[in-house]
Amino acid sequence: MNRIPATSDITGAGAGGLTARPHRLRRTAALRDLVAEARWHPGQLVLPLFVREGAAEPRPVDSMPGVVQHTLPSLRKAAREAVDAGVGGLMLFAVPEHKHPLGSGALDPDGILQRAIRETLDEVGDEAVVMSDVCLDEFTDHGHCGVLTPDGRIDNDATVRRYAAMAVLHAEAGVHCVGPSGMMDGQVGAVRRALDDAGHTGVAILAYTAKYASAFYGPFRDAVECDLRGGDRTTYQMDPRDRAGALRALALDQEQGADMVMVKPAMSYLDVVRTVADHADVPVAAYQVSGEYAMVEAAAAHGWIDRKRAIEESLASVRRAGADLVLTYWAVEAARWAGR
Ligand code: PBG
């Protein structure tokens, strides 16, 4: 018959009580909270928001339950709600009524994104950091992040010139921070120069430094009605198998004036978040993207996972990996949970 071992046998220490028992700090929720390492302050959460030109009312995004394409008035309300929950930043994406090969809506001074920036600022002022997406995929009819050469390839330099002009329009609308997300070579330097030349030296750049050609952007493309017509972004976004490239991109973006750098997506790239966090001289963001959101929501809707625990666990992993801020569609809920 097996003998039940004495306590001293289990813990490897004598009867003197000098025994390591990690369970002691896990006994109650208060103890666990007291010593938890990876936490988010609501002010470090950024909520991405979509606005749709010409929409009479908010339109649900089917592949992102709980997320909508806003009208300008509903955008204001959502911005207010987020700020009241303590959310630190808002990242604005706009969908124009008409798409165009050159994405011309992006450069219309009265275009939908410019209007969305003005409305949001009018609502929240400096209570949150208002950020804008500097990219063309929401505006082009072919769905690519830039303009194309006659033979259908991305025209990097012509695209970068458009990003620079877009960033200046966003700055004129009052944005605090621009997020060039198209992964064009030289985009950060060009945007910085254009902003500075136009006198907007105070507008910050959140660089999409390590943005991967990911399948997890699928639902976002529904949200911005982006149809790539069977194409992909593998010639300009990073290859999912590549980690060292993130460090090269980090060096380039910092050199060109990035104020913050981002890794995207988050969940499948936590090693990259850690690597970038270990080497960056500026704050590091991670983007918990639409596919990460959709996976959790879909599984939770089936009752296959515990929604709140899965969200909190995924957010903790991003923090543990070393991110200083996170873009997440759960920002408002997570801010409320964090602030409770
Ligand atoms: C490009 C952009 C994308 C996302 C943010 N900015 C899509 C892409 O590169 O295809 C994806 C965000 C998400 O999936 O939540 N403007």
Image: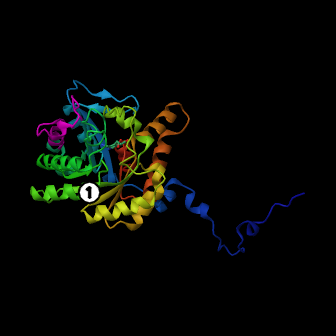
Residue 62 or 148: which is nearer the viewer? 148
Please say whether residue 97 is one of the residues in the magenta stretch: yes
User: Is 112 colored magenta in this rendering?
Assistant: yes
* Figure quadrant of the N terminus: bottom right
Q: Is residue 269 left or right of residue 110?
A: right
How far across and how far down the image is residue 55, in percent?
Answer: 22, 26
Write down which quadrant ligand 1 falls in.
top left
Disc 1 C-beta below 8 A from ligand 1: no
In the rendering, at what x and y percent does residue 255 appear? Answer: 27, 66
Asked if residue 290 can be seen in this view, the reply is yes
Residue shown at the point (26%, 61%) measured from the top left: 259
Q: Looking at the picture, does residue 16 appear above or below residue 38?
A: below
Quarter of the rendering containing residue 94: top left
> Disc 1 designates what residue?
186
Q: Badge 1: how crowded within 10 Å, few (<14), some, or many (20+)?
A: some
Q: Quadrant of residue 188?
A: bottom left
Q: Is residue 254 left or right of residue 5?
A: left
- Relative to the observer, which residue lies in front, 229 or 80? 229
Q: Mark 1 falls on what kind of element?
A: loop
Instruction: Name which residue lies at 53% across and 30% down.
Output: 302
Q: Is residue 131 visible?
A: no
Tell me the amino acid under the disc marked 1: Gly
Q: Is residue 217 above or below residue 178?
A: above
Among all residues in the image, which is located at the extreme top? 56
Identify the magenta region: 95-120
Q: Position of residue 260 (x, y in %)?
A: 29, 59
Direction from residue 321 to residue 333 in the image, left or right: left
Q: How many marks?
A: 1
Q: Residue furthest front?
A: 151
